[in-house]
Image (cartoon, rainbow, N blue to C red):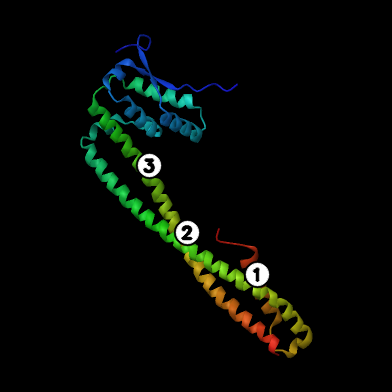
Amino acid sequence: MKRKTKNYLLIPDKFAQNFDDLEFIIDELIVYFNFLNEIDFEELKQMNSLHDSLDKIREEFSNICQVYGKLRQEYGVIYFQGNELFTRNTVTGIKLGLLVGKLERAKSIWGSDLSLDYEAAKELINHFTTRYLFKKDDE
Amino acid sequence: MNSSNDRKYVKYELNFKQKSKIADLASKKNVDADSIMSRIEDFLVSFTDYDNFTFWDKLLSFFNMKMIDFRSKIIADDIIETKKKIKEQKKLLREYEDDYFAIVALGKALESLNKI
């Protein structure tokens, strides 16, 4: 049977008495839960001007986010263009596929009298058909 | 310092948002929510004697720095991946353009069969 999860935390009374805004502290500890084990007191002691360091790291983070945002936007546009071109080639490729029949008929009627490399043409059609009608290779 | 036996506790009722976040954390870590809460309780016990706001302000700033640093590393990795994807996608765009002209040319060459 599944045990019911408790809805409260047991907090040392001394701690609770010293902080008016317990909700804020608990909120923060939940947010930073993954980092609770990373406390390094030596590092903490040395960081006298933590706010300056924090401002610097926030600024760097903001810059990296901007770069990332622009790159994602660029990728989005290029990906959209790629889809458009792929669809255009797929539609054009369907028409090409319909010409295979004509190619076969021409070969049976005129054969080598016609200056056309039937096999090379069929190979090209197969290549485009495989690429645009049976497979989308940039997913 | 009090021993763990004579230490007194108060009940802090979690609000809905906090319970949801804990449930979300537990799900991501594939553990039960109680173990998350126990870890937070243990943390508060170990820091009971650090009762001044300055220390906690510094501690929370420290965590904030760790979190930003962690996220920066993830984004930096993703930037490298996105740059690779953009390069690949640009190569594909060029191929699609070349293919289009080849398909159109081939189509025209074969269509002329009808006129013979």
Image coordinates for residue A106, horizontal then vertical, percent: 74, 84
The subunit carrying tag 3 is B
Q: Which corner quadrant of the image does residue B46 belong to?
A: top left
Instruction: Mark 3: give few (<14), some (14-19) or many (20+) Cα within 10 Å.
Output: few
Distance between mark 3 and mark 1 Cα atoms:
46 Å
Q: Residue at x 21, y 35 (%)?
A: A48
Q: Residue at x 34, y 17 (%)?
A: A12
Distance between mark 3 and mark 2 Cα atoms:
23 Å
Q: Is mark 1 on a helix, strand or loop?
A: helix
Distance between mark 1 and mark 2 Cα atoms:
25 Å
The quadrant the C terminus of chain B occupies is bottom right
Task: In the rendered view, tell whether residue B53 sits above or below residue A114.
Answer: above
Q: Which mark is residue A129?
A: 1
Left or right, B31 with reference to B69: right
Q: Residue at x 25, y 45 (%)?
A: A56
The subunit carrying tag 2 is B
The quadrant the N terminus of chain B occupies is top left
Q: Which corner quadrant of the image does residue B55 belong to?
A: top left
| Residue that numbered label 2 is attached to | B85
Left or right, B114 with reference to B97: right
Mark toward the viewer: 1 or 2 = 1
Q: What element carries label 2?
A: helix
Task: In the rendered view, tell whether residue A107 sits above or below residue B24.
Answer: below
Image coordinates for residue B89, horizontal then vertical, percent: 49, 63
Image coordinates for residue B60, horizontal then vertical, percent: 30, 32
- Front in this rendered view, residue A115 or A78: A78
Any part of residue B58 in sight: yes
Left or right, A123 with reference to B3: right
Question: Which callout, 3 or 2, points at the residue further toward the start of the chain?
Answer: 3
The subunit carrying tag 1 is A
